Image (cartoon, grey):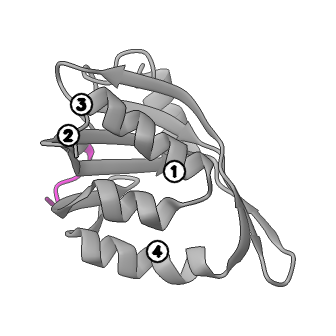
């Protein structure tokens, strides 16, 4: 099997998210020792912990309509950012719409650091230019929990 380039890996991850396969994308592309943050706070310190914390929510969905917008890739730095506007519909027909921003640092074909922002945190990051030049914004500075 041929190893994917960074850009190919990002596009493959995005395709999985659009196809409604977030757990599969996490399993394939998140480093085992990767760190995940939510609005500047440490959310998970490994892929296993990230999966465990997200799995019940995702498995409760009877359908997932993936929607990823505004993808920006900085190839040389192996950084990308994108908007996630996915819709989950649960078994009781309740619709949950995500409106968030993901910023990812990759290494050797895996995500080693991911920051998720929503609400005011997301708007602030967008205003500061993260979707124009994601390598100029360092979300880790928001968190002292690494």
Q: Is residue 118 visible?
A: no
Earlier along the polypeptide chain: callout 4 or callout 1?
1
Disc 3 versus disc 2: distance between alpha carbons?
7 Å
In the rendered image, residue 55 lying in the magenta stretch gets the answer no
Q: Nearer the viewer, residue 122 or 29?
A: 29
Q: How many marks?
A: 4
Q: CA distance from mark 2 to mark 4?
A: 28 Å
**Picture residue at 16% right of the left edge, 55% below the top:** 144
Disc number at residue 16? 1
Q: Is residue 72 left or right of residue 92?
A: left
Crowding around mark 4 (Cα neighbors within 10 Å: few <14, some 14 to 19, many 20+) is few
| Image quadrant containing the C terminus | bottom left
On the image, the x and y values in percent for residue 76 come to 17, 18
Disc number for residue 5: 3
Mark 1 and mark 3: span between their CA atoms?
16 Å
> Can you tell which of label 4 and label 1 is closer to the viewer?
1
The location of residue 100, given as percent across then percent down, is 55, 46
Sequence-wise, the earlier of marks 3 and 4 is 3
What residue would you read off at disc 2? 3
| The image quarter in which residue 24 lies | bottom left
Q: Over which residues does the magenta segment extend?
A: 142-146
On the image, numbered disc 4 is attached to which residue?
54
Residue 140 in view in this figure: yes
- Residue 118: x and y, percent? 54, 49
Between 105 and 109, the residue placed more toward the observer is 109
């Amino acid at each position: 099997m041929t190893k994917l380039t960074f850009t190919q890996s990002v596009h493959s991850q995005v395709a999985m998210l659009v196809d409604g396969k977030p757990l599969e994308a996490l399993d394939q592309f998140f480093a085992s020792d990767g760190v995940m943050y939510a609005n500047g706070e440490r959310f998970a310190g490994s892929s296993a912990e990230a999966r465990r914390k997200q799995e019940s929510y995702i498995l409760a969905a009877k359908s997932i309509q993936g929607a990823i917008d505004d993808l920006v890739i900085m190839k040389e730095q192996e950084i990308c950012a994108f908007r996630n506007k996915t819709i989950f519909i649960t078994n009781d027909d309740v619709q949950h719409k995500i409106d968030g921003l993901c910023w990812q640092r990759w290494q050797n074909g895996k995500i080693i650091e991911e920051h998720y922002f929503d609400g005011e945190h997301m708007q602030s990051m967008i205003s500061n230019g993260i979707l124009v030049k994601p390598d100029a914004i360092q979300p880790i500075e928001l968190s002292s929990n690494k």
